[in-house]
Amino acid sequence: MPNRLAHETSPYLLQHADNPVDWWPWSADAFEEARRRGVPVLLSVGYSSCHWCHVMAHESFEDPDTAALLNEHFVPVKVDREERPDVDAVYMEAVQAATGQGGWPMTVFLTPDAEPFYFGTYFPPAPRHGMPSFGQVLEGVRSAWTDRRDEVGEVAGRIVADLAGRSLTESLPADRRPPRPEELHTALMGLTRDFDAVRGGFGGAPKFPPSMVLEFLLRHHARTGSAAALEMVQATCAAMARGGIYDQLGGGFARYAVDATWTVPHFEKMLYDNALLCRTYAHLWRATGSDLARRVALETADFMVRELRTEQGGFASALDADSDDGSGKHVEGAYYVWTPEQLRAVLGEKDAEFAAACFGVTEEGTFEEGASVLQLPDPDGPVDAERMASVKERLLAARAERPRPGRDDKVVAAWNGLAIAALAETGAYFDRPDLVQAATDAADLLVRVHMDWQARLHRTSRDGAPGANSGVLEDYADVAEGFLALAAVTGEGVWTEFAGFFLDTVLLQFTTEDGALYDTAADAETLIRRPQDPTDNATPSGWTAAAGALLSYAALTGSELHRTAAERALGIVTALGGRAPRFIGWGLAVAEAALDGPREIAVVGPQDDPATAALHRAALLGTAPGAVVALGSPGSDDSGEVPLLRDRPLVDGRPAAYVCRHFTCERPTTDPEELAERLRG
């Protein structure tokens, strides 16, 4: 019999709707039930493409005996961390403070007042490797709750008091200023120390794609000419593109590599990773003309449109790591890995030998049971490009016949904002209007479905219907970022207007008087702590993403209010950039834009004039950090026109471009090559 989750819209919660566990969604009713029964709450947090979430579900939550124990002595609450990042952040902070580590599934025991008192992540069904079984944990917590209730309450009270006492205000510099050039150089030196000069990337295993750090390094190179910054980007992007973390057949990136060599990925594919990396590779091509960067940017964009686009025009959240291996058993990576025998079955002996050499497929394998993750270990690539294309086409067709990984088809506002920015720019750079249209369709969906009449955002939607959860800071910031990028590419000022609505909400609902930002709105549900995290995780932090969008919007409109808010928000980058540059990469990238101006480029002329198009393209391809671009016709009274375009006449009747800083402009130019030269960092 289905439990209460059967009425939810989250694909992750629906995966648990037929569990024998009597799950509740996160709600006041669940905690009232715990209070009525006098039992603790088991909070289990995960997401649909999480491998170990599936493992624990199969081992424990589908087990009738475990379910009976849970149902009798606890109120079990299941949360999709992608729908409720606020709930996840608050309790993950407690887990990390108590255990020194975190992850998903996250398992937390709470009082009926939602105060945490015992923590963990994955628990096995039987004791192993020093871990207690999940059943032992449940019995231990039940016993403590029954026999030592006062002690449990004291522990919970201390944890909540410790969390409440944490504040970032003291981390902000007294003058709330952005980083200075020497402080950004210090951040560069910190990254240089952590850089893996042999294998690319930063740190050891597991290795995550450092998208935000790479954007900082590209902007730092553009501003300063630093060869070291560019070399780190090139080496990392090449290593990822040749490694197993990149899908060599279908394009797109997996979540991370479990090793330090980018060989074996954790196979789930997330929208946010691919959106961020698509934009990174496009920007690397813009800076260097790299053929590899161009190929990967386009293949990743095509992957997003092909595999993640929904019927409503938005982009789904993720593809699972696991899929049916053909025997009815769900196995991680089954869809993606190959053995020599499988290559021979598809390609024949000679082409299989060629493919094995190109992709690093061996009899021993690089993954489990003799299977190999496809790589391109030869940096020079195959000599016979035509043969390689034929091999890839046949292998991709054969792979399409395998059982496909599941798809989490909820649309998350923030991640769609990232995808809009990536697809709009990639489409513009490589003359792919279909990608720009895909970005526009996603933006239309966010306006039609996610935005209400007060310009407040719903965080998620599914099948064209908005979810019940309110947007958090990253939703407003990343959607604004995406809309500003789309406006720059299309010349449709309405997207700038919508970005302004969302950024006004950031100022009113998320920003404090001292320039700090919170992850949840002032009128959001009250949790045991209001979450506030300025550091990047898998995506840019909401704090620094908001700073970037505020800065760009100010450059387009001349708004001192938004400029001041951006600069004050960057104070946290001044505090943390030198100490932890790997974890505040987007903030460092925004700081580079602030130092450069950012430059403001107004392109005026009829949009159907090839001369206007040439100037517009030169503006978009400029590498000046964080430069903003406005495109419009002179004298237009279009309500969507942005202030940067006002009073910008043609020059001798010809389309012209104006390069400005703080609305103070150089002489206009009608020459695309001259414009390009002015915008080279």
Image: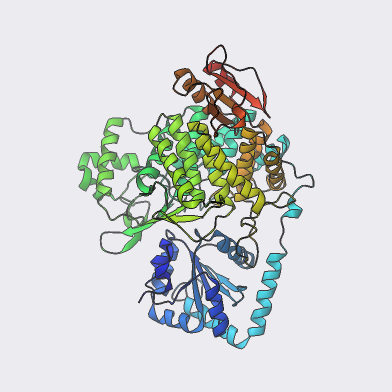
**Residue 193 appears anywhere in the view:** no
- Describe residue 247's horizontal placement relative to residue 398 as left or right: right
Q: Quadrant of the C terminus?
A: top right
Q: Position of residue 244 (x, y in %)?
A: 40, 46
Front one among 258 and 483:
483
Q: Is residue 367 above or below residue 394?
A: below
Q: Position of residue 442 (x, y in %)?
A: 44, 44
Q: Residue at the bottom extreme?
A: 147
Q: Is residue 328 above or below residue 219?
A: below
Q: Position of residue 42 (x, y in %)?
A: 52, 75
Front one among 497 and 541:
497
Q: Residue at x 52, y 39 (%)?
A: 495
Q: Is residue 112 above or below residue 388?
A: below
Residue 350: image quadrant is top left
**Residue 402 appears anywhere in the view:** yes
Q: Residue at the top extreme?
A: 652
Front one among 362 and 331:
331
Residue 215: image quadrant is top right
Front one among 526 and 248:
526
Q: Residue at x 75, y 50 (%)?
A: 514
User: Total of numbered circles in the picture?
Assistant: 0
Q: Position of residue 418 (x, y in %)?
A: 50, 44
Residue 90: image quadrant is bottom right
Q: Quadrant of the N terminus?
A: bottom left
Q: How is the image coloured?
A: rainbow
Q: Residue at the front extreme?
A: 637
Q: Residue at x 50, y 45 (%)?
A: 417
Q: Residue at x 64, y 68 (%)?
A: 528
- Describe residue 282's horizontal placement relative to residue 182 as left or right: left
